[in-house]
Image (cartoon, rainbow, N blue to C red):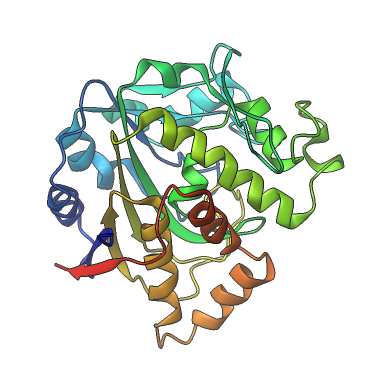
Amino acid sequence: MTKPVVYFSREITSENVVRLYEKLGVKLPGKVAVKVHSGEEGNQNYLRPEFMAPLVKEVDGTIVECNTAYDGARDTTEKHEKLMVAHGWSTLFDVDIMDADGDDLIFPIENGRVLKENRVGAHLANYASMLVVSHFKGHPMGGFGGALKQLSIGCASNQGKVAIHTGGASLKQGDFWDKHAEQLDFIEAMAEAAETVVNHFGSNLAYVSIACNLSVDCDCCAVAEDPCMADIGIFASLDPVAIDQACIDAVLNSDDPGRDHLLERINSKQGTKIIEDAARLGYGSKDYELVEI
């Protein structure tokens, strides 16, 4: 079987992001959802919309997000839409909060060990394809955030996020913390949820990950730790498992003095289990070919 290709460039520019996407050789059909992280109010590390503009224009995409399941500036549609304006997303792009209407698109998970279903924002059904743009960095709960997290937590509705975090035990927002699943179940739930989105779009998916502003914290943190190591570069692939593994490998292979601090966060949360689970579920490969551009 042919290994999936992960394209890589050390130079992080808007033009290079487009260049690496073009290397994938795909034309995403129909209406294109561009999944980004809007950045919590107060966060300093998220990818800025100005940086994203050439890529979004390239695919003629709509920026998509979903509401959070914890208190903050993005837990209701009204607040989230205000933040999208404040952060500049709505100025440059069409923006769609996919669970704005409170309705969910429910994907059954037939053989899930943790979840029996995945709830995503209902507007996901309006798109023929998706470009998943990830800011690769650490995460306080998942260990790291990359393409697989964007497919799972990122596309999940408010209720879907609660379901993933509680291992399917609840859909109630107040249970997000009170009934949180054991760590390994939470990680596996993310992998199971991500598979449903991959299955939904089929081959109409592409992934771009930017490893910059490498904090141990996510863009969902209003008060995030500053980056602990130097920027690495841009990755692009058609395989979500391969691109996440390539980002992890780039950290492992780095001689940056801040590398161990980031790895401690990733390993303490058993973050790479999501890559193992996704590969086991069969929707991607850990074995890839890295092509530097």
| Outermost residue, right side | 178
Q: Is residue 71 visible?
A: no
User: x and y percent of residue 142 in the render?
Assistant: 62, 56
- Label total for image: 0
- Residue at left 51%, top 59%? 275
In the visual, does 153 lie left or right of 173? left
Question: Is 67 placed above or below 106 here?
Answer: below
- Residue at left 53%, top 55%? 280
In the visual, does 257 lie left or right of 224? left
Quadrant of the rendered image containing residue 5: bottom left
In the visual, does 282 lie left or right of 168? left
- Residue at left 82%, top 31%? 174
Q: Is residue 212 visible?
A: yes
- Residue at left 23%, top 36%? 56
In the visual, does 182 lie left or right of 77? right
* Quarter of the image where the C terminus is located: bottom left
* Quarter of the image where the N terminus is located: bottom left
| Outermost residue, front side | 1
User: x and y percent of residue 256 in the render?
Assistant: 42, 85
